[in-house]
Image (cartoon, rainbow, N blue to C red):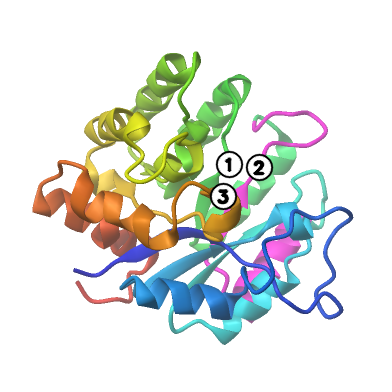
Amino acid sequence: MRIIDCHAHITSFDDRRYPPKDKPLRPPQGVGSAEHLRQVSQAAGVSYVRAIQTVSYYGYDNRYLCDSARRERAWMAGVCTLDPDDPRSPGDLARFVRQYGVRSLRSVPSPARRTFDDDGVRALWRTVADLGISVDLFLMRSEHISGASKLLEAFPRLPVGFCHCMDLKPGPDLVSSLEAVRRLARFPNLYAKVDFIGTGTRQPFPCEDLHQAALAVIDAYGPERCVWASSYPNEVWTPKITYAEHLRIFQEVLPLTSAARRQILGETARRIWFPEIRG
């Protein structure tokens, strides 16, 4: 079975060449680079990875992401993140695609207006559509759902990955947040990253406190619109479990059919983001 990791964050060990922002969230020493990600992912049987711009380390400086996407294009697809309040961002996105082979934009709300319903966000989505690439939607708060929904309605043919499904986690807000995530399944171009088991769990492997939530999301979207993601580096983003354990939950633990596993672990991502890979 082909396995594709749809969400991994990368950071360079070379802070002089790729300077981090002030007070970056640093992974442990020796962890976080594209090279280390390749070792960890290959050891787990993963063939391809979508690498995400690490805003918590670099802000909107995409140099390491772009260089890695070009250098490691045989197994990596780059997902940049740009400031929608910066009028230069659409031009930067076009340059990243042409020069470095970046394949997707991770879309964030306007920092100034705190909404996706914003001219700067729309300009980036229009550029994505013109370039024939895709969007990853960083929708993490309930107050941003309305604005995100307007963008999804305006761009119905654009493939959109749903980052972390609003960061579902155990607690008093789980029921309402899960219901909001399920309601968003009405947008047929929205694809759920079911990685919140690792990022949100309060338990060690196999993280049973979020199994039912994951199954509910898979039921709402269908396996053909769900994807697995590691949220690497796991020491930072899934501290209760390792990369391999996160994958094992979907390979072995969740009660999924073999056809559903095939879709979630690789086929959905291949169809949307890696069309050059033969089925």
Callout 1 amino acid? Phe
Q: Nearer the viewer, residue 117 or 220?
A: 220
On screen, 248 above or below 120? Answer: below
Per the model, the C-alpha gap separating discs 2 and 1 is: 5 Å
- Element type where label 3 sits in the image: helix
- Give me the residue at 19% from left, 53% from top: 252
- Give me the residue at 40% from left, 16% from top: 175
Q: Which residue is mark 3?
A: 237
Lateral position of residue 101 relative to residue 198, left or right: right
Mark 1, residues whose alpha carbon is within 10 Å: few (<14), some, or many (≥20)? many
Ranked by sequence position, the earlier of labels 2 and 3 is 2
**Quadrant of the snapshot with the C terminus:** bottom left
Callout 2 amino acid? Val
Circle 2/circle 1 CB separation < 8 Å: yes
Ranked by sequence position, the earlier of labels 3 and 1 is 1
Lateral position of residue 243 relative to residue 247, left or right: right
- Give me the residue at 33% from left, 59% from top: 269
On screen, 27 above or below 68? Answer: above
On screen, 50 above or below 113? Answer: below
- Which mark, residue 108? 2
Is 106 one of the magenta-colored residues? yes
